[in-house]
Image (tube, coloured by chain):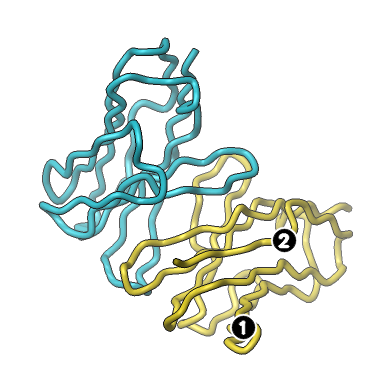
Amino acid sequence: AQRVTQPEKLLSVFKGAPVELKCNYSYSGSPELFWYVQYSRQRLQLLLRHISRESIKGFTADLNKGETSFHLKKPFAQEEDSAMYYCALTGSNYKLTFGKGTLLTVNP
Amino acid sequence: NAGVTQTPKFQVLKTGQSMTLQCAQDMNHNSMYWYRQDPGMGLRLIYYSASEGTTDKGEVPNGYNVSRLNKREFSLRLESAAPSQTSVYFCASSEGGSNSPLHFGNGTRLTVT
């Protein structure tokens, strides 16, 4: 069975501070990992995926197979980063399993 | 391109009533999905269709049925609505394959009284 754990329901930081949203996964094979974001009153959208090894809106995420983690990081948070963030995993069955989400609030 | 379009946006049902949520995508995607989003539970997969003509159960299929009408459309039916089905429902589509990102609709907010 595949599982995604986001240990923090809520995360609050000040503008300019570093932010890290934690994600741990459980999967016996080689997973494909994603971060999705939902801004207020907008549809859920892809933020980044580990296979692309890209930085989007200043966010990066590194897959650590030893720790089975895929934490999302940004060195300097902005107020517009406030949103709900979901970590997600796809296995060989192509089903995308989501974590329960972390609500990030960036305070001015 | 409209992307993924869901109808209706809002719906209120009484216990025992039935309804169908409609979803259509114009991206020529192979795979389509239905999720429900509940506070503290994240998104849970109800049903998915890896390709036209196939459907499979997800994590929480009880009380729901689906139809992949054609490559564009994937509907979700509640035969006898229950208050536990009060939720926000999202349809999504993807090209298919394990590293294909999902494209989501705007969601349907359903309340069952």
Q: Which of marks 2 and 1 is in front?
A: 2
Residue pictured at 14% horizontal, 51% vertical? B71
Report the side of A7 relative to A17 (left or right). left
Q: Position of residue A27 (x, y in %)?
A: 48, 75
Chain drawn yellow in the picture: A
Subunit ID for the residue under disc 2? A
Under circle 1, the secondary element is: loop
Q: Tell me which corner region of the image, top left, top right, bottom left or bottom right, holds residue B102.
A: bottom left
Chain drawn cyan in the picture: B
* Residue hosting label 2: A7
Q: Position of residue B58 (x, y in %)?
A: 35, 51
- Alpha-carbon span between mark 2 and mark 1: 17 Å
Under circle 2, the secondary element is: loop
Residue pictured at 33% horizontal, 13% vertical? B17
* Residue hosting label 1: A62
Report the side of A37 relative to B9 (left or right). right
* Amino acid type of the residue tagged 1 in the rendering: Asp
